[in-house]
Amino acid sequence: MNDTRRAVLERLAEGPVPGPDVADDLGVSRNAVWKHVEGLRGSGFDIESSDDGYALEGIPEYGGPAVEFGLDAPFSVEYHDAVGSTNDRARELAAEGAEDVVVLADEQTGSRGRLDRAWSAPSGGVWASLVLRPDLPPAHVPALTLAAAVATTDAAREAGVPAEIKWPNDVLVGTEGDRGGRKLAGILTEMEGEADRVSWVVVGIGVNANIPVDDLPEGATSLREEVGEVDRRVFVQRLLERFDDLRGDPESAVEAWRERSATLGQRVRVERADGEVVGEAVDVAFPGSLVVETDEGRVRVHAGDCEHLRPV
Ligand code: BT5
């Protein structure tokens, strides 16, 4: 949504207002106001016109303009009913110079997990990829993945789901149970940069929102399964707002991650490209490495797949 359209919408949301007043306030022509009102109606906003002027009576349930409306974070949203992978689309936008754009889809037909694993993304999910241009050295980018995991966890908790984070990027529910938790969300961060500067980062966040578990892989859960259907518009807004708070202070993201972690204090096995590490997960160190106390001493693991083991 462009800035003028957003401003028109905000004026109409305050109550009935005559078109000419909106035009004067925003310094645009009456015809321009009318065009924006028609555009907003086309996007699903219910705008009534009466003798008192225009009034906003209803907003679309979901989609780009719906998420942008009332969003307290500086992101614009490109929405797709269906797309191959939101990360792939976000990478295209990043290559074109985009910043603070969120690619959001109802369904993905070719989405990816880490290490080119498949990610199942049927209709009803929250599939979002954030195009960022942070002023960070590449080595600090993992902190953004932690920030995204915290933001996702907090949005899930606000929706009533007691989510926790498994290092580095899985958001789980029910980690106390025998099966070690069911996966609610995953994060895939990709970047391009030089030795000392990031050019762009794409943080891809996949949340099983309003999806029946039968449509998901074994071991997965969804918000719908845990608490019933959620308002995806509000969920995405809270997630983006929380992420926006955290990204400016990566150290605080790591601290917030510790507080929501299901991994710290657990016996873990971490599979790395160059072998496995087994021991107790004792800390996460900036910008996101897991510190494991092994029989041979402390090891810092930067990347890998982590499994929580039963205590010995
Ligand atoms: C992840 O990978 O957890 C990262 C997933 C990132 C997906 C988002 S959606 C928006 C954006 N666009 C993309 O194309 N991707 C991102 P990983 O840790 O490698 O976990 C992958 C494994 O999780 C798979 O091998 C399955 O076992 C399991 N899995 C697949 N789909 C799942 C789902 N919907 N829910 C829970 N688990 C799933």
Image (spheres, grey):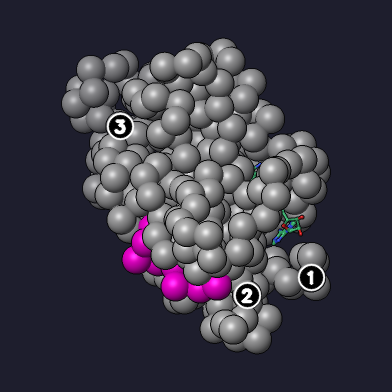
Specify the amino acid type for callout 1.
Glu
Residue 124 vs residue 4, the one in the foreground: 124
16 lies left or right of 302:
left
Determine the secondary structure under disc 1: loop
Q: What residue is shown at x 44% (from left), y 30% (from top)?
A: 139
Residue hosting label 2: 309
Count of numbered circles on the image = 3
Point out the residue furthest to the front here. Answer: 296
Q: Residues within 10 Å of mark 3 (few under 14, many from 20)?
A: some
Percent coordinates x, y for residue 271 in the rendering: 68, 54
Does residue 114 lie above or below 4 as drawn? below
Q: CA distance from mark 1 to mark 3?
A: 45 Å
Residue 57 in sight: no
Instruction: Determine which of the numbered discs, if any, sits on residue 7 in the image.
Output: 3
| Quadrant of the frame with the N terminus | top left
Residue 189 in which image quadrant: top right
Does residue 312 lie above or below 48 as drawn? below
Determine the secondary structure under disc 3: helix
Specify the amino acid type for callout 3.
Ala
Instruction: Report the magenta residues as a range.
Output: 257-267
| Quadrant of the frame with the C terminus | bottom right
Residue 137 in sight: yes
Specify the amino acid type for callout 2.
Leu
Q: Is mark 2 within 8 Å of ligand 1?
A: no
Percent coordinates x, y for residue 298 in the rendering: 45, 56
- Viewer-nearest of labels 3 and 2? 2
- Viewer-nearest of labels 2 and 1? 2
Instruction: Determine which of the numbered discs, if any, sits on residue 218 in the image.
Output: 1
Q: CA distance from mark 2 to mark 1?
A: 19 Å
